[in-house]
Image (cartoon, rainbow, N blue to C red):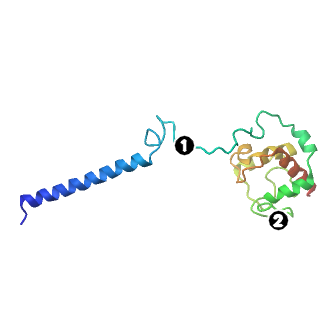
Amino acid sequence: MFDTMTMTKAVGAVCGALLVFLLAGWTSDTLYTVGADEHGGEHGEGPTQAYTIDTGEEAAPAEGEGETVDVAALLAAGDAAAGEAVFKKCGSCHKLDGSKGTGPYLNGVVGRAKGTATDYEYSEAMLAVASESWTPENLFGFLESPKQYLPGTKMAFNGLPKAEDRANLIAYLATVN
């Protein structure tokens, strides 16, 4: 019942199946891998881009590159009415009526000690600087990039890249007590 010819056919079928899988894997690697190594890059350089779409962003310099921002002049020229419009980005997490939101309330924040709003659990990083106060200059730096200004903060907002928006927001917050 189990002769040499049956055994030869079984071994041939297994070898043939392995050969098909090996060739399929090699073909898919050839078709779908970009670059010289298994990570898509040339000699550990990381993945290479298959094609580039020119959006013109690289031609325009990013805001803040190569220019010095006069924070005092910007804060003095801050427009509270324009800051109220900027606050709409903040209003989903922060309240202005002294009540708790996702973030601490912001009425009276200009000049208030950091990490002292009631009914809010601050991060350890914020509690470590609680002896400092929220001066307009401190707020200006924090609002640019909260995670860079105070590593470990709970604030997940990426920040306001435009210096004028930050100055206007601080002018508005200074009017809300």
Specify few, some or many for label 2: CA neighbours under 10 Å numbering under 14, 14-19, or 20 or more. some
Q: Who's the residue at 10% across and 61% down the image?
A: 6
The image quadrant where one finds the C terminus is bottom right
**Residue 146 appears in the picture as rendered:** yes
Measured as percent of width and height from the top left, residue 84 is found at: 88, 57
Classify residue 173 by image quadrant. bottom right
Specify few, some or many for label 1: CA neighbours under 10 Å numbering under 14, 14-19, or 20 or more. few
The image quadrant where one finds the N terminus is bottom left
Location of residue 69 with respect to 87 vertically, above or below: above
Measured as percent of width and height from the top left, residue 127 is found at: 75, 50
- Depth check, mark 2 against mark 1: the one in front is 1
Which mark sits nearer the N-terminus, 2 or 1? 1
Measured as percent of width and height from the top left, residue 39 is found at: 46, 43
Residue marked by disc 1: 49
Q: Who's the residue at 84% across and 37% down the image?
A: 69
Location of residue 102 with respect to 46 vertically, above or below: below
User: In the shown orientation, is residue 168 left or right of residue 121?
Assistant: right
Residue type at mark 1? Gln
Residue type at mark 2? Ser
Q: Which of the numbered marks, if any, corresponds to residue 99?
A: 2
Q: Who's the residue at 54% across and 43% down the image?
A: 49
The alpha-carbon separation of the residues under discs 2 and 1 comes to 49 Å
Q: Which of the numbered marks, if any, corresponds to residue 38?
A: none
Badge 1 element: loop
92 or 44, nearer to the observer? 44
User: In the shown orientation, is residue 159 left or right of residue 51?
Assistant: right
User: In the shown orientation, is residue 81 left or right of residue 92?
Assistant: right
